[in-house]
Structures are given as structure tokens and as C-alpha cells.
Amino acid sequence: MQMRTIEIVVGAFMLAGLISLAILATRISGFNVNSEAGSYTVYASFENVGGLVVRSKVSIAGVEVGQITEITYDKNNYDARVKMEIDSDVDNISVDSTASILTEGLIGGKYVGLSIGAEEDFLGNGDEIFDTQSAIVLEELIGQFLLNQF
Amino acid sequence: MLGRLRNLGHYSLDLFATLGRAGRLWWLAIFRRPSLGNVSLVVNQIYRLGVLSLVITVMSGFSIGAVLALQGYNQLVKYGSESALGLGVALVLVMEIGPVVSALLFAGRAGSAVTAEIGLMKTTEQLASMEMMGVDPLRRIVAPRLWAGFFALPILALMFSVVGIWGAAVIGVEWLGVHEGAFWSTMQEGVDFVHHVMKGVIKSVVFGLVVTWIAVFQGYDAVPTSEGIAAATTRTVVFSSVAVLVLDFFLTLTMFNF
């Protein structure tokens, strides 16, 4: 075959590879360039994180505004310390907001939901949310329910 | 007893010598003589290794995606979570099956051809006559094939994954009736570009290097007879398949934080 034709075919091959990568990035992985644009760190301590994992989402009103970046055990307070990155354009979360661990559907993954408080001061980088609600552990709930029956 | 010990020693020395020759070939072809200056040779090899493997790769990708959709649907529907079908198929294809199966196909389709070609060149003393003419066969023959495999296999693996997911969508959404929005949105929610897609790409880059390295070396190191070429071609397919599967295990182990 002519070298020119081969070069054109190989060019098309390379282009098809790049297009595949683009499809994988946008259509299949939902890769968002803006998601790394900027964020600030907020901490919260929970009695029980029951199933929350790193890269779980943080949401306000059901809309994702950030994600969990670290979960560690705080041995001084015997609780779990959760570090989350919130998108920097969501900068008006008041300091008395509540962070609760919620479940998507009945058996879905855990995520942190923020309910906004009433204070005029807003959370900044490195601040802590003090009002927290732990994960609802289904086994405990069933246990309590059984206890109430008898 | 002593005879067996001697045999063991003989085979070990043989193995080390072969590994040494293979390493030296790779080193000489890639590091000491970067021959990307002669791009048309590489382009020609990308055409022969990559473009000509396209049909088999795309067809296998579609079939595997379709089969994954059928099997996955049958299991997921028991738990009423058939909307997770897209996520499952996409993760499996992007992280494991795409890179691995395309590398296996590449070894069978392109690797064996490279081995046979170089082996025949050696048997008919074309390599020796090249050296006589002052043309370096490492630069002229070996390096372009190594570079071509390095570029071609990741592209083939990406296309394999994309076509596989398309096949799964055709079967899952059009035929089995999974909700289209749920199929794509759970996939986009769960598949991460850096954590899943790029790690799959790294895998296929490694596989591309290893498979073409084995193919080129087996041809270059073949016993210059017709049986020698036959044995070398077989070894290429066997060694590269085993190498791909074993390497896949270790790459998965190191990259995905177990």
C-alpha cells in the first residue's frame, strides 16, 4: 500500500484512540474538569460513621457540593473524624449547620448531608461542624424496635 | 542425582542467559538508540500491528460487552438492581477486561506475526546482511516494532472498552429494557476517570511494552530453522499470554490499594 495511505489510516487510528479516551472521560466516567477547581476543608466528628467511605459525596439539599477525603479514628474523643472538601463556590454554609450521615435509598451508599443553620457567620477553611448526627445502623434500629415490642 | 542437579543448573543458566539477552535487546533498542527520528517506519508498524488488529478487537469487544450485559442482568435482576448494570459492565471493562483481553488478542494477532517475520529475516540472513551493509537491525527492525506496540495496544484497549460498553448498552437498554437514564447515570456516578480509566490505560501501556518485547525478542532469538520459527511463534503467544495475566494481577494489586 502507498505510504501516504498508510499514514492517513494510522492518523485516523490515533484519532479514534483519542476519541475513545474522550468518550470514556465524558460519557462514561462523567469526568468534570471544574470539580478540581477549588475547595476548602471542613471537619466533623461523628459517633459512628457506619459505612461512610472516602470519596463519598457531601450534599446540600440533595445536590453534591463536595466529597469526603479522609476518615480517621480520634482516640482522644473515641469518635470518627471526617475530613471533607467543599467546593469553594459554596461559601455560605453557616457555622451552626448540621452534618448528618444519610443513606441513599434503603441499601444504597452512605453520604453526608448538610442542613444549613441560622447563624450569619460562614464556615471557612479548616473549620469544624459541631452539630453532627451519626449514621443510622439498621441492626440497632431493629434491636430497638424488637425491644419496644415486648 | 548429580545428573538432575546438573540439569537444573543448565536450565537456570539458560533462563538467565535468555533474560539477559532479552534485557540487552530492549535496552539497546529503546534507550541507547532512540530511533523515533525515522517516524515512517514506526507509522508503518502501527498500521500493521494496530490498524490491522482493529477488526478482531472491536468485534471481540462488542461480544464481550454483550455477554457481560446478559449475564450481569440475570444476576442483578434478582435483587431488583438492574440499573447498576451499566456501572458493573463499565468498571469491569475499563479496569480489567479491556486491557487484558485486547492484550491477549494483540499477542495472538500481532505478536505472532512480528515473531515470524523477524525469525524469517534471521533465518534468511537478512539481519546479518543488514549489519554487513552498515544498517543497524536493532534500529531499523526492532525499535520501530517496540514503539508501535507501545502506542497501538493502549488505543486498541480504549476502543475495546468503548465498543464493549456500547455492546452492553445495546443488549441491556434496547433489548432487556434497563432504563436508559439509570444505565448511563449510575455509570457516570461510579466510574472515575483518574481512578479507573487511567489505571486501565497504564495497564495496557505496560502490556503493550511486554507483549511486543516478547514478540520481538523471540523472533530475534529464534533458532534459524523452520521448526525454530514455529517454536518461537508458539512461545510468543504462550509467554505473552501468561505474562499479561500474571502482570495484571500484580498491577491490580499495586494500583487499586488492596
Image (cartoon, coloured by chain):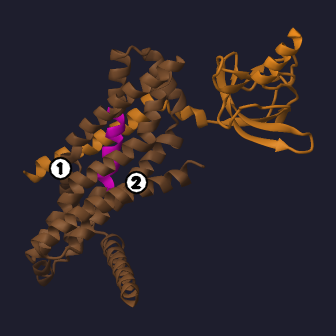
Chain colours: A orange, B brown
Residue B161 among those drawn in magenta: yes
Cα distance between the residues tagged 1 and 2 = 33 Å
Instruction: Find residue A100 and report its image quarter.
Output: top right
Q: Chain of mark 1?
A: A
Badge 2 amino acid: Leu
The main secondary structure of the magenta stretch is: helix
Task: State which quarter of the image contains the N terminus of chain B.
Answer: bottom left
Left or right: where A72 falls relative to B43: right
Q: Which residues are magenta?
A: B150-163
Left or right: where B213 falls relative to B52: right
B20, above or below B77, in the image? below
Residue B18 among those drawn in magenta: no
Front residue of this view, candidates B214 and B149: B214
B187, above or below B247, in the image? above
Look at mark 1 in the image and give the residue it sits on.
A7
Q: Is residue A137 visible?
A: no
